Image (spheres, rainbow, N blue to C red):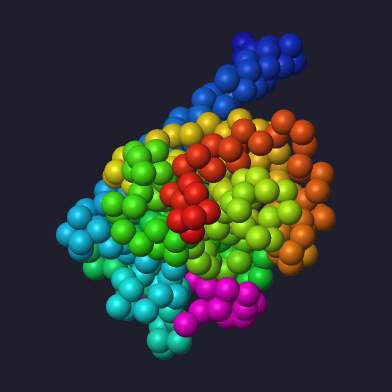
């Protein structure tokens, strides 16, 4: 009788080593491809939202959709807050029942953007936005994007925007409540409670694409922006890894001391960039 020859221990170890090597090459490549695909979808989403925003003002005598979901119907809120199946509004800091994606979609459907033709719910969600979980009900947050408060609260007509191609109208918001609650806020050097008199984070900015984010502009285009400061991501990581930290920017009339370590000298490239794109560039126009 002949005996079948099996693998030797050495041969088995070689196979395992080769498999491990191939996985170490393939897995990062797959992750990178997935990230790039999410970025491409997000870029398309923001471009569609920015273009619809631009088209709306063109057909409404330069008036904007309201950046605030709490605005009245007459003020044309671009989206509304999540709504439960029984018609009651969801709360941003409630713990039970949790806010579902369907609740958020019902609020989106009540907004002017949806009515204006952007009626694919996927347009409101970045596929790379998987990092955020609410600090209150623990669920993921569906709507990824927000409009900055400068568009509507300070400037009310399109003709007031200087250089629309460089002023942003959509950002990826990093809200930690149950949903993106209001307009995206950013502290300006002339805010009376800004003790530093410089551009400064107030609401979180999401970093859903490695070191990059997607930003939409008032002329209807969108861009990929690479964040420059390590503190920008570290600040966001700190915010979401500490459930008790609910105020991302200032606390009351002074700097939130929890974030004091993130005011590293020289770490202001990102806030300067966002400041240059803020629609209001002079305190006399606020």
Q: Relative to 199, is 132 above or below?
A: below
For the point 40% across and 75% down, the residue is 71
Stretch in magenta = 89-106
Name the image quarter holding the N terminus.
top right
Q: Residue at x 77, y 60 (%)?
A: 254
Q: Is residue 182 left or right of residue 15?
A: left
Q: Which of the two residues, 137 or 257, is positioned nearer the viewer here?
A: 257
Say which of 252 and 195 sits in front: 195
User: Does the magenta segment cover residue 93?
Assistant: yes
Q: Quadrant of residue 248?
A: bottom right
State the residue at coordinates (44%, 64%). Answer: 153
> Which residue corresponds to the image point at 46% horizontal and 51% vertical from the top-left?
280
Q: Position of residue 173 (x, y in %)?
A: 52, 53
- The answer to whether 59 is drawn above or below residue 93 in the figure is above
Q: Main secondary structure of the magenta part?
A: loop
Looking at this view, name the residue that lies furthest to the front.
284
Q: Position of residue 113 (x, y in %)?
A: 29, 63
Q: Is residue 210 above or below residue 114?
A: above
Judging depth in this view, the residue of 145 and 160 nearest the camera is 160
Q: Quadrant of residue 285?
A: bottom left
Between 51 and 32, the one nearer to me in the picture? 51
Q: Is residue 44 visible?
A: no
């Amino acid at each position: 009788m002949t005996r079948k020859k099996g693998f030797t221990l050495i041969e088995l170890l070689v196979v395992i080593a080769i498999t491990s090597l191939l996985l170490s090459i393939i897995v990062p490549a797959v992750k990178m491809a997935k990230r790039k695909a999410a970025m491409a979808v997000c870029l398309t989403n923001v471009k569609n939202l920015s273009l619809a925003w631009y088209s709306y003002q063109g057909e409404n005598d330069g008036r904007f959709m309201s950046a605030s979901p709490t605005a009245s119907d007459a003020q044309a809120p671009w989206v509304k807050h999540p709504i439960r199946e029984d018609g009651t509004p969801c709360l941003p800091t409630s713990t039970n029942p949790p806010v579902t994606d369907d609740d958020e979609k019902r609020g989106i459907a009540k907004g002017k953007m949806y009515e204006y033709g952007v009626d694919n719910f996927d347009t409101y969600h970045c596929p790379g936005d998987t990092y955020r979980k609410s600090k209150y009900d623990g669920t993921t947050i569906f709507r990824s994007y927000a409009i900055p408060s400068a568009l509507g609260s300070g400037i009310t007509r399109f003709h007031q925007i200087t250089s629309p191609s460089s002023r942003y109208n959509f950002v990826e918001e990093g809200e930690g409540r149950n949903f993106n609650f209001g307009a995206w806020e950013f502290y300006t050097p002339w805010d009376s409670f800004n003790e530093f008199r410089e551009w400064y984070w107030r609401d979180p900015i999401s970093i859903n694409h490695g070191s990059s984010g997607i930003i939409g502009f008032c002329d209807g285009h969108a861009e990929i922006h690479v964040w420059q400061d390590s503190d920008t991501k570290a600040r966001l990581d700190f915010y979401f890894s500490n459930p008790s930290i609910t105020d991302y920017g200032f606390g009351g009339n002074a700097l939130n001391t929890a974030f004091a370590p993130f005011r590293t000298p020289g770490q202001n490239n990102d806030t300067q960039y966002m400041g240059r794109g803020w629609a209001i560039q002079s305190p006399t126009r606020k």
